[in-house]
Image (cartoon, rainbow, N blue to C red):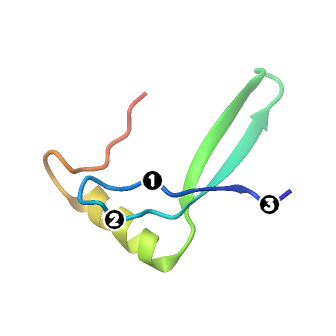
């Protein structure tokens, strides 16, 4: 089965094309969900979000 695709939007309204991949961790009965850029335009947009500061910045939450 092909990986699921997502198309969320940034605060500025730009669409991000993301590919969803799931890694099963059977020993822990958990899954790791990873969203990866699905094209070069999205990869550049994600890079800009990572480099930014302030309100529109991409950050990790655990």
| Location of residue 24 (image quadrant) | top right
Residue 28, position in %: x, y?
76, 21
Residue for badge 3: 2
Which quadrant of the figure contains the N terminus?
A: bottom right
Residue for badge 2: 14
Q: Nearer the viewer, mark 3 or mark 1?
A: 1
Mark 1 / mark 2, whichever is N-terminal? 1
Q: Does dot 3 land on a helix, a strand or a loop?
A: loop
Residue 47, position in %: x, y?
34, 66
Q: Nearer the viewer, residue 9 or 46?
A: 9
Alpha carbon separation for disc pair 3 and 1? 19 Å
Alpha carbon separation for disc pair 1 and 2? 8 Å
Does 31 appear above or below 14?
above
Q: Does dot 2 land on a helix, a strand or a loop?
A: loop
Mark 3 / mark 1, whichever is N-terminal? 3
Q: Nearer the viewer, mark 2 or mark 3?
A: 2
Q: Residue visible at 29% across and 60% down?
A: 13
Q: Which residue appears farthest toward the left when viewing the image?
A: 54
Residues tagged 2 and 3 counted as in contact (Cβ below 8 A): no
Q: Nearer the viewer, residue 61 or 56?
A: 56
The mark tally for this picture is 3
| Location of residue 9 (image quadrant) | bottom left
In the picture, measured across the screen, residue 4 lies left or right of residue 27, that is left
In the picture, measured across the screen, residue 35 lies left or right of residue 46, that is right
Q: Residue visible at 51% across and 64% down?
A: 17
Residue for badge 1: 8
Mark 2 / mark 3, whichever is N-terminal? 3
In the picture, measured across the screen, residue 41 lies left or right of residue 36, that is left
Q: Residues within 10 Å of mark 2 (few under 14, many from 20)?
A: few
Q: Residues within 10 Å of mark 1 (few under 14, many from 20)?
A: few
Q: Which residue appears farthest toward the bottom when viewing the image?
A: 40
């Amino acid at each position: 089965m092909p990986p699921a695709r997502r198309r969320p939007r940034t605060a500025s309204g730009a669409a991000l094309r993301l590919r969803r991949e799931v890694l099963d961790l059977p020993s822990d009965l958990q899954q790791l969900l990873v969203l990866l850029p699905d094209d070069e335009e999205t990869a550049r947009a994600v890079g800009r979000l990572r480099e930014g500061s302030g309100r529109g910045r991409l950050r990790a939450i655990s």
